[in-house]
Image (cartoon, rainbow, N blue to C red):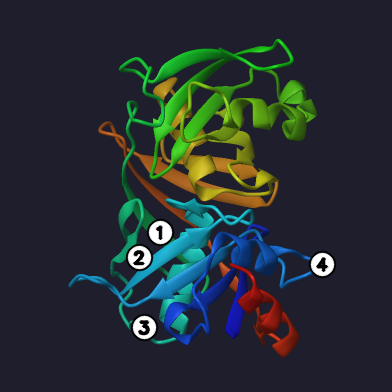
Amino acid sequence: MHFEKWQALGNDYIIVERDTLPFALTPARVARICDYHLGIGGDGVLELSPPDASGFVARLRIFNPDGSEAELSGNGAREAVMYLRAHGWTDQRQFSIQTAAGEIRPTIHDDRTCTLDMGRARLRSDDYPGGADDGRGQLTTPDGRVWDFQHLQVGNPQCAIHVPDLDALEALDLAAIGPGIEHHAAFPNRTNVSFFRALAPDRVRARIFERGVGETSASGTGASGAAIAHVLRGGDAPVTVLLDGGELVVDVDESLLFTLTGWAVPVYAGEASGALLDDLAALA
């Protein structure tokens, strides 16, 4: 089993090509592969395969480290896009790939950076079925804290929470707070959470808690959720989002069409050992 490890702002994924795998990916196998002690170790697995429709370069499946499948990841999608170009799946700088969230259209700028056309964000979705038309709501976590939030569907569900004080934002214990929001009854499919504060009209600081992951140094869709929520509050676009792992730039227009710009690079290529393959094959 050949693989490559890529990272974007410290968000690392293991990339595999489906047609070279000796078995299908299952939740148990993905979780084992992502285990830093028992497997390869990563924030998830990206599986690339030939497309099943014309006009696309590849189909991308995105798996969280707990084995669940994600609709979309901004960092993961950028890593996959740069991998496809580096490995000759296409020689074009603009092309389309299939994801569970729909079509993603990247534009490659150089050997590290690309812009993803992510489509249109929505304020209403089945991921927040009781929501108002503007996507705004309020919830109480098990610790009794009350949070005002902005729901956004950006390929996956986002719960963006504005924190008015920067020190308070930095002091948040996301490991303690995040699960109560991720699994809140208001979100039947669970939700990702972005806590953010404006630093300037076109710049925000954000901290991210992802479904099936926990607190993460960077998240493209999480950054997008924070940026779009900032624009809905009167902020200027494009928005530079400062994450623990670095910066991403999100541009959003009045119709909530948005793009995401950032870098992604390979870390190393490898081959799984026979012992690991035996263990993976034994898992359902």
Q: Position of residue 82 (x, y in %)?
A: 47, 73
Q: Earlier in the sequence, mark 4 or mark 2?
A: 4
The residue under the point 62% across, 29% down is 195
The disc placed on residue 89 is 3
Residue type highlighted by circle 2: Thr
Closest to the observer: 32 or 206?
A: 32
- Dot 4 lies on which element? loop
Q: Quadrant of the C terminus?
A: bottom right
Residue type highlighted by circle 4: His
Q: Give the Cα distance between marks 4 and 2.
A: 36 Å
Mark 2 lies on residue: 107
* Residue 241 drawn above or below residue 20: above
Question: Which class describes the residues within 10 Å of circle 1: few (<14), some (14-19), or many (20+)?
Answer: many
Mark in front: 1 vs 4? 4
Q: Earlier in the sequence, mark 3 or mark 4?
A: 4
* Residue 222 drawn above or below residue 231: below
Q: Residue furthest left?
A: 54
Q: Earlier in the sequence, mark 1 or mark 4?
A: 4
Mark 1 lies on residue: 115
Q: Position of residue 144 (x, y in %)?
A: 71, 10
- Cβ–Cβ below 8 Å for labels 2 and 1? yes
- Dot 2 lies on which element? strand
Q: Give the Cα distance between marks 1 and 4.
A: 34 Å
Residue type highlighted by circle 3: Trp
Q: Give the Cα distance between marks 2 and 3.
A: 15 Å
